[in-house]
Image: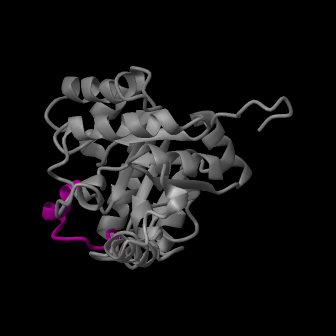
Amino acid sequence: MSKQGTINKITTSAIQKMKQSGEKISMLTAYDYSTAATMDEAGMDIILIGDSLGMVVLGYDSTLPVTMEDMIHHTKAVSRAVKRAMVIADMPFLSYQTSIQEGVYNAGRLMKEAGAHGVKLEGGQEVADVVRKITSSGIPLMGHLGLTPQSVHQLGGYKVQGKDDKTARKLMEDARVLEEAGAFSLVLECVPAQLAGEISRALAIPTIGIGAGVACDGQVLVVNDMLGIFEKFTPKFVKKYAELNKDIRSAMKQYIDEVKSGAFPGKEHSF
């Protein structure tokens, strides 16, 4: 808050200043109004509507089935809730890979229809042309390198990327290309901590790590993972700050018991 009580919105320039000053950037995913509102009130810097919603919200086995309509629907819900944080929406699989024109159009839809403040897409040199066109159209863009879930089959599974010299050099080159193409920041997922630190120091734009060590300029996690809501699997890089699934299950069991016994609703819940 400023002295006048107005909300200082997080923008690309604010994110850049955080890197320059050494202030770490906080980022989590959100997919609904209530969660996003709580997150914004808590002081989150960036809220990402990740295509991870495919797994933690829609029940798919990967992010690949997520559509533009899915992303627009959930981004609208989040953007309605947010007053301060920067809202970034993932561009889903095949929304930008088929042509530059389609990539720009879909990025624009996430801004114009869904209320996002920027978009995120996966890939390095192979997507540089679409990144340039999107950013030159006035759309803030966050890159994503390392483990890129939309390419999980090509990568041979969910594995750490950049462990050998060749792939490490490729990640550094891709990072530089994305910066040159206009990306305002870059997610590094499942990258060795030393390499992530080298990339972070080499770039003028901020890096956001997920399973990439503490040397990145910020961190991101899937909210359902860090709150202990999604229990199908837990990646090594996740720290659980709560075990909400246990609390939710306990509350639901108590509700069932009270409904069946007639303890709920009581007089205080009745008209």
Q: Which residues are magenta?
A: 150-162
Q: Residue at 45% of width from left, 43% of height from top?
A: 33
State the image coordinates of residue 211 (x, y, percent, origin top left). 43, 70
State the image coordinates of residue 114 (x, y, percent, origin top left). 37, 29
State whether residue 246 is above or below residue 147.
below
Residue 59 lies in what quarter of the image? bottom left
Q: Residue at 73% of width from left, 50% of height from top?
A: 21
Q: Nearer the viewer, residue 122 or 2?
A: 2
Q: The N terminus is located in which quarter?
A: top right
Q: Is residue 13 visible?
A: yes
Q: Is residue 211 visible?
A: no
Residue 69 lies in what quarter of the image? top left
Q: Residue at 13% of width from left, 34% of height from top?
A: 98
Q: Nearer the viewer, residue 4 or 205?
A: 4
Pick out the residue farthest to the right. Answer: 3
State the image coordinates of residue 168 (x, y, percent, origin top left). 36, 66
Can residue 8 be found in the magenta stretch? no
State the image coordinates of residue 40 (x, y, percent, origin top left). 58, 46
State whether residue 112 is above or below residue 124.
above
